[in-house]
Each structure stands twice: as structure tokens, then as C-alpha cells.
Amino acid sequence: MEYKRILLKLSGESLMGNQGHGIDSGRLSDYAREIGEIVEKGVQIAIVIGGGNIFRGLSGAAKGFDRYKGDQMGMLATVINSLALASALQDVGVRTRVMTSIRMEPVGELYSQPKAVDALNAGEVVIISGGTGNPYFTTDTASALRGIEIHADVMLKGTRVDGVYSADPEKDPSARKFESITFDEVYRKGLKVMDLTATTMCKENDLPVLVFNMDQCGNLLKVLKGEKVGTLVH
Ligand code: UDP
């Protein structure tokens, strides 16, 4: 396998499938099966999930919510999504542990790097929920942070597009996909791969990011086999 230990980032929106909101159980079981497949091959997997399918602090603030509370609501939304994926993983027989960045036993145990690493070494999938535990951050930044902390070989950013493009491919027919791109080029061209806090964390700590389409069945395994899928940002 191309990577031994990965940090998989899934957006909250990816969990809603075609429903437009909430959690699509079909999508969850697809993800669980794909993750189970690579666990069987001995890959260590930590997962960070977003909460955008349920609540985002920033859009809440636009509707009059207090940003601090709105962000806490967003972080709790990531916990809901994490429990849902943990349950789907258990259904397919994958040993899974949910950790939370905010103390809330017995929903999940409080995240700690050594405990997460021990669990990964023992072959468990570790879902790290609750973002960074702080407002004004995103789950992309949480993924970067946790990926760096656990010494992941790569952060796999599962999205609904198949990589990083020079422009929005839905609006600009001349947009082309990059096979690989440096962090500096991402800054220079103003490409929207992740927010800048997350991008900078990855650049400064040498955590490469592979952006790929997680909704295409089998892609996760292809990535792990080293097949040319998505865009590598390094
Ligand atoms: N959030 C936060 N701190 C974090 C991570 C997330 O406050 O460290 C909140 C923030 O309000 C964000 C929401 O949780 O809008 C959901 O996360 P995100 O928008 O990253 O989810 P995604 O877009 O990946 O579904």
C-alpha cells in the first residue's frame, strides 16, 4: 500500500448524499465498506468529519446566531456525523473508536494523541470528532492538526470533485485538473483547496494533501494502491 497511516477528511455535506440535508444511510454504508476494505489491507486510518450537512457557525452568524455558540453547534454536528459513521463501520465489522476534542464521555473519549496512536497501532479506526474544539476554525484545520499530531503519511481529502482545477470546471470549460501542485502554487493562484489556516498548517509541517472524489466507488482503494487519482498538494 502507498501509505501506512492516513488521515481521511470527509465533509459533512458528503454524508447527505443526494438528499440535500442530514445523513444518507446508503452513503454511510458505502463509505464504511470502502474504509473496511483498506483496514483489511493493514492501513491505519484516522478520520475527521465536518458538520456542514447539519450546522455551520458562519452561516448561523449570518442568520443572527452568536458566532461562538454557532461554532460550538457546528462542532457538535461533527460529533453526530462521527457517531453515524462509527455505527456504520461497526455494522461492517470494523473496530472503531470515537474520540471527541471536547470532553463529553460517554459519547466518546476525550482525544489524546498517545491514545489515538495506540488505537491505530492496534488496528482500530479512530474517528476524531468535535473539530479542534475551538471556534473560528474549520474541520479542514482540525484534519491538518490531527494528521500532523498522529504523524499521518498523508491527508486524504475526500470531496465531490476529482481533484484541484485551475478554475471551477462547472463554470469554465477551459479549466484543467492538476495531477500535483505545490502549496506555494495554491497560494499564488488563489486556488480553493482548503482554507488558508489548514493549508499553512500542512505546508509548514510537510503533510501532503491528496484531494480526490470519494463518491466514486473504489477510489479510496485506488489511492492506497498508488493509482493516479485526484490531485496531490505537496
Ligand atoms: N467548527 C469549529 N471549530 C473547529 C471545526 C469546526 O468551530 O475546529 C464549526 C464551524 O462552525 C464549522 C462547523 O463546525 O462551520 C462545521 O465544520 P466545517 O464547516 O468544517 O464542516 P464541513 O464543511 O467539512 O462539512
Image (spheres, rainbow, N blue to C red):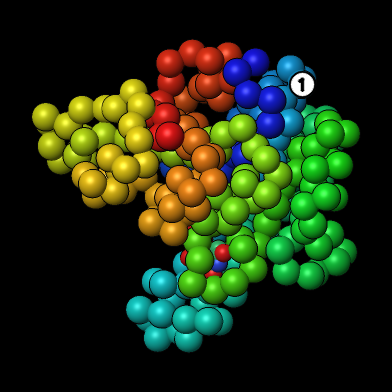
- Above-or-below relation of 68 to 109: below
Residue 218 location in percent, x, y?
A: 54, 19
Q: Is residue 69 left or right of residue 1?
A: left
User: Quadrant of residue 79 in the image?
Assistant: bottom right
Q: Residue at x 43, y 50 (%)?
A: 199
- Closer-to-camera residue (4/90): 4
Q: Is residue 218 visible?
A: no
Q: Residue at x 52, y 56 (%)?
A: 141
Q: Residue at x 43, y 16 (%)?
A: 228
User: Quadrant of residue 94 in the image?
Assistant: top right
- Above-or-below relation of 154 to 135: above
Residue 11 location in percent, x, y?
A: 50, 48
- Above-or-below relation of 100 to 7: below
Say which residue label 1 marks: 42
Residue 187 location in percent, x, y?
A: 29, 48
Q: Amino acid at mark 1?
A: Gly
Looking at the rendering, in which quadrant would you find the C terminus?
top left
Q: Is residue 126 visible?
A: yes
User: Quadrant of residue 162 in the image?
Assistant: top left
- Judge the density around disc 1: few (<14), some (14-19), many (≥20) Cα neighbours within 10 Å: some
The kind of secondary structure element at disc 1 is loop
